[in-house]
Every structure is written in C-alpha cells, then in structure tokens.
Image: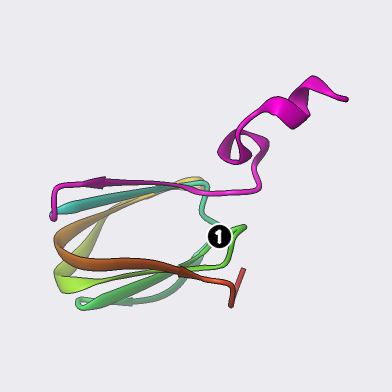
Amino acid sequence: MDIRDLAPPEVRGSAPRLTLTGREEVLIEGHRGLISYETENIRVRSGMGLISVSGKHLTIAYFGTQDLLILGRVQDVSISEEGG
C-alpha cells in the first residue's frame, strides 16, 4: 500500500472540498472549471461531478485555477454525478 492511498480524497485530487460559511459564502477548492454563472445558480465542474450552488444575489468573489469563492444568499448546494 502506498502512503498516498491513506490521504483524504481532497488531498489526492479526486474530490473537491466545499466549505459553507453560514448562508453567505461557499468556498470550492479543487474545482475543474465553471459551467454556468447566473445570480441564482452557479454550476461548477469537479472530480466528483457537477456542483450546483443555488440562491439569490450570487456572485463569484474569487476565481482561481483551484479555488472558487461564491458570495450571496445561499439556499442549496448539491453535487450530481453529471458533468464531472
């Protein structure tokens, strides 16, 4: 067994890490690109599938090669197997 097999999926690069702070902020680490951006829904590609953030007045405060910060009134965060 390789020691890397013991690392959590987000460290191995196979899974994103999502951090929800209250209802106003979602940090997505390890994304694979933006699919769509509207003020009520932002969809992001990840190694696990499609991440969808729904809410009101959503904005992308930061968009980097690995990280994405979404601000606004977050109502729902979901991951589907499509689009990964």
Magenta includes 26? Answer: no
| Near-viewer residue (44 or 9) | 9
Picture coordinates of residue 46, whole percent (x, y): 55, 60
Amino acid type, callout 1? Ser
Side of 3 where 26 appears, left or right: left
Query: Which of the 4 image quarters holds residue 9?
Result: top right
Snapshot colouring: rainbow
Picture coordinates of residue 4, whole percent (x, y): 75, 26
Q: Residue at x 58, y 49 (%)?
A: 15
Side of 46 where 71 appears, left or right: left
Q: Secondary structure at mark 1?
A: loop
Picture coordinates of residue 41, whole percent (x, y): 28, 77
Side of 8 where 75 appears, left or right: left
Residue 7 position (above or below residue 58): above
- Residue stretch in magenta: 1-23
Picture coordinates of residue 45, whole percent (x, y): 53, 66
Residue 59 position (above or below residue 15): below
Mark 1, residue position: 46
Q: Residue at x 38, y 68 (%)?
A: 78
Q: Residue at x 50, y 45 (%)?
A: 66
| Near-viewer residue (42 or 60) | 42
| Near-viewer residue (53 or 32) | 53
| Near-viewer residue (78 or 57) | 78
Mark 1 residue crowding within 10 angstroms, few (<14) / some (14–19) / many (20+): many
Query: Which of the 4 image quarters holds residue 49?
Result: bottom right
Residue 61 position (above or below residue 12): below
Magenta includes 21? Answer: yes
